[in-house]
Image (tube, rainbow, N blue to C red):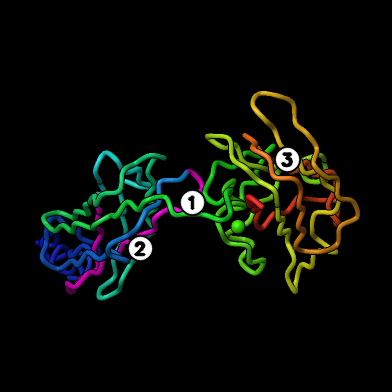
């Protein structure tokens, strides 16, 4: 009798699980923005970016597992999005979508599934855009890349020093030079002007944090690098170098020092035919 009485005395709240696993319930909303999402088939062009969302419209917190799948043409940065879901609160996660160079323009689909709920998001593969800046989106090559930065950050089309953290590049060998950063073209490309935007913001002016000493080099075929120009004691944010246009297969900066003698910081490297 005593034992039975003890069981009855357990507070009712402890018998109800605080968290239930969602298995195809009707109290969950899946969302994704934007729709459609657009993707450009270049190796360093900014990826198509979807924000995935789950909202628990039930009366109790829950845990949900979203399965993320897509057509074979698409490379997805994640295949699952699992989260604890409080009631009536949108929980979000990013999904980056890329496709290989040469992928034909078409509309594909990313499928988001939670239990029996699913959402089919259109993914539009765009033609490669006409570009004045022939480095934009092309394959960047660097001697090293700091773990907080992106290799592609220097050729992603964003030259705004204020967005340096999300859209710039620097090496991973603090205080050790030279560092190199450039692009390998897939076919000979004519350039006659190169523009470097080094870090130059109100907080981090070029004279304090920017690249100071560097060489602009180009390569033709498998031949050795040719130095086009040497720049020394630079303190400006934007440096333009013009020269007799020539067809090259690669372009790079060899950076010998920065104004803080730490990292080689590039917000954007651009090249034009004239
Ligand atoms: Ca950039």
Left or right: 220 in relation to 105: right
Count of numbered circles on the image: 3
- Write down the quadrant of residue 198 in the picture: bottom right
Q: Residue furthest right?
A: 233
In this rendered view, identify the residue nearer to me: 267 or 83.
267
Q: Position of residue 88 (x, y in %)?
A: 25, 76
Residue at horizontal 19 percent and vertical 73 percent from the top: 57
Whole-angstrom CA distance, mark 1 to mark 2, is 18 Å
Residue at horizontal 80 percent and vertical 37 percent from the top: 227
Q: Quadrant of the N terminus?
A: bottom left
- At mark 2, the secondary structure is strand
Left or right: 98 in relation to 263: left
Left or right: 13 in relation to 253: left
- Whether label 3 touches label 2, CB < 8 Å: no
In this rendered view, identify the residue nearer to me: 59 or 120.
120
- Whether label 1 touches label 2, CB < 8 Å: no
Residue stretch in magenta: 43-66
Instruction: Find disc 1 in the rendering and name its residue.
Output: 45
Quarter of the rendered structure image containing ligand 1:
bottom right
Whole-angstrom CA distance, mark 1 to mark 3, is 20 Å
Instruction: Find disc 2 in the rendering and name its residue.
Output: 51
Residue at horizontal 25 percent and vertical 53 percent from the top: 65
Residue at horizontal 32 percent and vertical 51 percent from the top: 125
- At mark 1, the secondary structure is loop
- At mark 3, the secondary structure is strand
Q: Which mark is residue 180?
A: 3
N-term mark: 1 or 2: 1
């Amino acid at each position: 009798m005593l034992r039975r009485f003890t069981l009855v005395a357990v507070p009712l709240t402890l018998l109800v699980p605080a968290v239930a696993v969602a298995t195809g319930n009707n109290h969950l909303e899946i969302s994704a923005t934007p729709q459609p999402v657009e993707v450009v088939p270049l190796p360093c062009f900014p990826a198509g970016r979807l924000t995935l969302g789950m909202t628990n419209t039930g009366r109790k917190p829950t845990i949900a597992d979203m399965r993320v799948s897509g057509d074979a043409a698409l490379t997805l940065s994640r295949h699952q999005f699992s989260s604890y879901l409080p009631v009536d609160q949108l929980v979000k996660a990013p999904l980056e979508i890329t496709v290989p160079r040469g992928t034909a323009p078409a509309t594909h689909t990313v499928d988001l599934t939670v239990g029996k709920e699913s959402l089919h998001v259109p993914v539009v593969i765009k033609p490669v855009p006409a570009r004045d800046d022939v480095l934009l989106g092309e394959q960047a090559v660097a001697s090293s890349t700091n773990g907080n930065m992106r290799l592609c950050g220097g050729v992603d089309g964003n030259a705004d020093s204020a967005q340096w953290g999300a859209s710039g590049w620097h090496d991973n060998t603090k205080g050790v030079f030279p560092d190199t950063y450039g692009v390998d073209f897939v076919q000979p490309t004519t350039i006659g002007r190169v523009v470097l935007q080094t870090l130059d913001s109100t907080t981090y002016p070029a004279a304090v944090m920017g690249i100071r000493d560097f060489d602009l080099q180009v390569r033709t075929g498998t031949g050795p690098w040719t130095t086009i120009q040497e720049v020394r004691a630079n303190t400006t944010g934007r440096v333009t170098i013009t020269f007799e246009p020539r067809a090259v297969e690669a372009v790079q900066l060899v950076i010998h020092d920065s104004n803080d003698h730490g990292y080689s910081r590039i917000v954007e490297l651009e090249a034009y035919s004239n």
